[in-house]
Image (cartoon, rainbow, N blue to C red):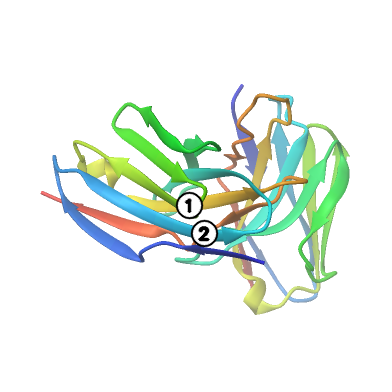
Amino acid sequence: GQNIDQPTEMTATEGAIVQINCTYQTSGFNGLFWYQQHAGEAPTFLSYNVLDGLEEKGRFSSFLSRSKGYSYLLLKELQMKDSASYLCAVRRTGGFKTIFGAGTRLFVKA
Amino acid sequence: DTEVTQTPKHLVMGMTNKKSLKCEQHMGHRAMYWYKQKAKKPPELMFVYSYEKLSINESVPSRFSPECPNSSLLNLHLHALQPEDSALYLCASSPVLAGSTGELFFGEGSRLTVL
């Protein structure tokens, strides 16, 4: 089976830093992805972790601890356009099965 | 070309109609996917094709019939759908090369309404 948990909603202020957590349970872990989805649009890829540690990409960083089944997405210098849903997704071994968490809706306020 | 193109963008159909959703990519990706997404819910995996062969069917009702005619095209044939099948249908593709992240590239989706 597979279970992915994220907070439903978060609110943060423009210019601030926000951390969105994701915990997962899966048999056969083969990578964790973060996607951004604006309302009415398709998800777009943000980051990928398969080994423990931090991956940094501009204003976005993602962290993974496989032993804890835990990841977070860190967004720095928040902008209004960062208001979107952030989806944590886990890929299983042995194929191409990528399953999404329910997503965290982030509201950035001025 | 880094796009996944889906047509039509919007589709309204009756419960007795037969229609098809189409998806095309020219990135050389050999894995293609159909996901279904309801409002304020995450995408739910329906089907995966790998090298033009169906590799995953997530127990999807037979009124949804996928087809992969070649490595660039993916279709979803719809027949005798129910109103609860109304949703955004997302096509995605991913590379399968060793060393790639295997990230999903999504199309804009086809918004389906079943009356």
Q: Earlier in the sequence, mark 2 or mark 1?
A: 2
Q: Amino acid at mark 2?
A: Tyr
Residue B79, labelled with which disc? none
Tell which residue pokes out farthest to the front in this image: A67
Residue at the image position 58 percent from the left and 51 percent from the top? A90
Q: Pick the quarter of the image with the N terminus of chain B.
A: top right
- Quadrant location of residue B101? top right
Secondary structure under the numbered disc 1 in the rendered image: strand
Q: Which residue is mark 1?
A: A88
Q: Which label belongs to residue A24?
A: 2
Classed neighbour count for the residue bearing mark 1: other residues with Cα under 10 Å, few (<14), some (14–19), many (≥20): many
Corner quadrant of residue B59 = bottom right
At x 80% / y 74%, what residue is drawn? B80
Task: Mark 2 vs mark 1: give the one in front.
Answer: 2
Q: Is residue B2 visible?
A: yes
**Residue B5 point in image, percent of width and height:** 64, 37
Circle 2 packing at 10 Å, graded few (<14), some (14-19), many (20+), is: many
* Above or below, B60 relative to B23: below
B110 to B73, vertically: above or below = below
In the rendered image, residue A75, in percent from the top left (x then y), is placed at 28, 41
- Determine the secondary structure under disc 2: strand
Q: Is residue B27 left or right of residue B53?
A: left
Asked if residue B115 shows in the view, the reply is no
Residue placed at 28% from the left, 31% from the top? A59
